[in-house]
Amino acid sequence: MNIITKFTVVTKQGMETLLMLTKDLAIEKFSSLIKQNVLENYILKNFNEQALVAEVNSISNQWLVVYVDDQPAGYACITSKGKRPENLEGKRAARILYFGVLNKYPAPAVKDALLEKCLSVCKSYENIWIDEYIDNPVLELFEHKGFIRQPGTGKLDGLPLTSVCLIM
């Protein structure tokens, strides 16, 4: 199994890959947790071509895609914009805004490769944080890599789900 993680830019192939991954991962991640119409509206608002082109072109964001044997398997988006946890105010911090690997790629090495690339990209920051729905199994990977679960909960951006913040 050949695993490689690459930056994504606005090209026809790059956008087709992101459109497929963002939609498929949102469905895998949230379809059992929220109503279908809420999920469809979330995907339509956040992962349509126009929104993705704007987000990929934003200087505040870096989009990564992990490939397994040359097939797109997952993606992450790292950003420096948005509201951050209070204890990170005034610090150089990056947020892993989106992180996911398709269920058909269950090998831990795939998620590890994507997270390691995220950590490498963020090494110049004082802190890295992620806000994710409270029961997401990927939180265990982040905690294993040194992220610390913060007290309290919040609401996940754009979805009616309880979230938790982890900081490294």
Image: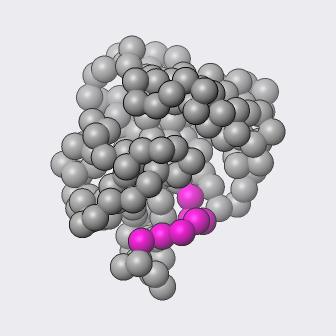
In the rendered structure, the answer to whether residue 149 lies left or right of residue 85 reads: left
- Residue occupying the point 40% across, 30% down: 33
Using the rendered view, name the quadrant where residue 16 is placed.
top right
Front residue (pair 45, 52): 45
- Which of the colour schemes (rainbow, by chain, secondary structure, one colour) is used? one colour
From the viewer's perspective, is residue 104 above or below residue 120?
above
Front residue (pair 105, 149): 149
Residue range corresponding to the magenta coloring: 79-85
- Residue occupying the point 38% across, 70% down: 127
- Is residue 98 among what the camera can see? no
Front residue (pair 122, 163): 163
| Residue 85 in picture, x, y percent from top left | 42, 71
Which quarter shows the C terminus? bottom left
From the viewer's perspective, is residue 129 above or below residue 157?
below
Q: Is residue 80 magenta?
A: yes
In the rendered structure, the answer to whether residue 90 lies left or right of residue 143 reads: right
| Residue 55 in picture, x, y percent from top left | 70, 49
From the viewer's perspective, is residue 34 above or below residue 92?
above
- Residue occupying the point 39% across, 14% down: 104
- Is residue 33 among what the camera can see? yes
The outermost residue toward the left is: 144
